[in-house]
Amino acid sequence: MHRTYSLNAFFRARFGRRVQKIPLDAGFDCPNRDGSISRAGCAFCNPSGSGSGLLDKGLDLRAQWSHWQERMQKRYGAALFAAYLQSYSNTYGPHEKLEDVLRQLKGLPGLAALSIGTRPDCLDERKLDLLAEQKEQLGLGEVFLELGLQSASNSTLEHINRGHTAEAFARAAEQAATRGLNVVAHVIAGLPTPEGREHGDDLLATVRFVNGLPVNGIKFHNLYVCAGTRMAALWKNGRYEPITLEEYCDWLGRALMILPPETVVHRLNGDPARGELLAPQWAGEKHTVLNAIRDHLQANDIWQGKNNGAPHGPPDHFTPPQENRHAS
């Protein structure tokens, strides 16, 4: 029995085979860094905005695609790929820039899906319409819109200098869903707060908030401290204590039990880029973390949706029900 409805399972059900994501850096900026909202950025965000650095090395989108495609074909035997516009906020700036970037994706070999990472306050009607058109324009099987929520607590969002509210996320998710976009929420466990840091009940509150919205998928991240971030200063000054692996497994298990069984789990944990991790050290051991999560779910007989109407975990090729069921 599977314990979660994974993105891999979704892709196999949707396309009949593995689909591998390819991260692309299109050179977008962020309003929380360029002064439109702030120049400080979010407290946890690294200087590269989760980018690969290939654009800085002179590789355009097609060259980046070729770079990753060759490696992933050798490693996974993948033939289908999802373009992931990942770095910073990929709908920020003029409509024409987004249009040009999307135009460059046309004809990429093996392109089956598109995923756009952005902030909820970097979308408008015109951009949402443009994204919704890409399924037909690029001949895609799926278009994901990955929106950063991080926490449903506005107090926490203000404390980490996020620059938008939970309500802004809700509006963006609803507007995107009406256009047929596959909305994915990013949430982070263990964020700092004015009183210390968020705990398990805070993560549950965020998941319940997401459950009440037209969100198709979710990415869980454990907060880790990266060099060059405001979190690094908080940690070095003893003002932030990272969560333990045991805490994260416990919180994640509780969150998965209230998650609707049809929500696709795109990630179970975050893993830092090489050389950027300061703390906690366990966050840099990806396979150890995934094994610990797996063991915790199995030992406690936890599966996704257990407390939200699912009598068992999802099978290999899970067919979601037509109606969402949300935990209260």
Image (cartoon, helix red, strand yellow):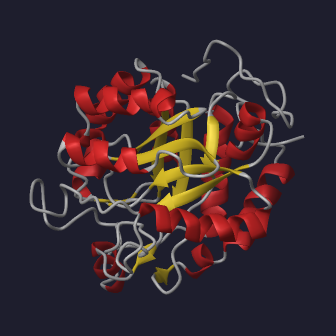
Nearest the eye: 295 or 84: 84
Quarter occupied by residue 45: bottom left
Task: Report the side of 284 relative to 90 (left or right).
Answer: right
| Name of the residue lying farthest toward the top | 323
Query: Which residue is painted at 74% across and 72% down in the image?
Result: 288
Query: Which quadrant holds residue 134?
Result: top left
| Number of disc labels | 0
Instruction: Using residue 210 as the reference point, say whether residue 13 is left or right of it.
Output: right
- Tell me where residue 124 appears, x and y as whole percent: 23, 31
The answer to whether one can see residue 234 in this image is: yes
Q: Residue at x 64, y 49 (%)?
A: 110
The residue positioned 33% from the left and 59% from the top of the image is: 88
Q: Is residue 80 above or below residue 144?
A: below
Q: Position of residue 187 (x, y in %)?
A: 46, 48
Identify which residue, 12 or 219, lies in the foreground.
Answer: 12
Q: Quadrant of the N terminus?
A: top right
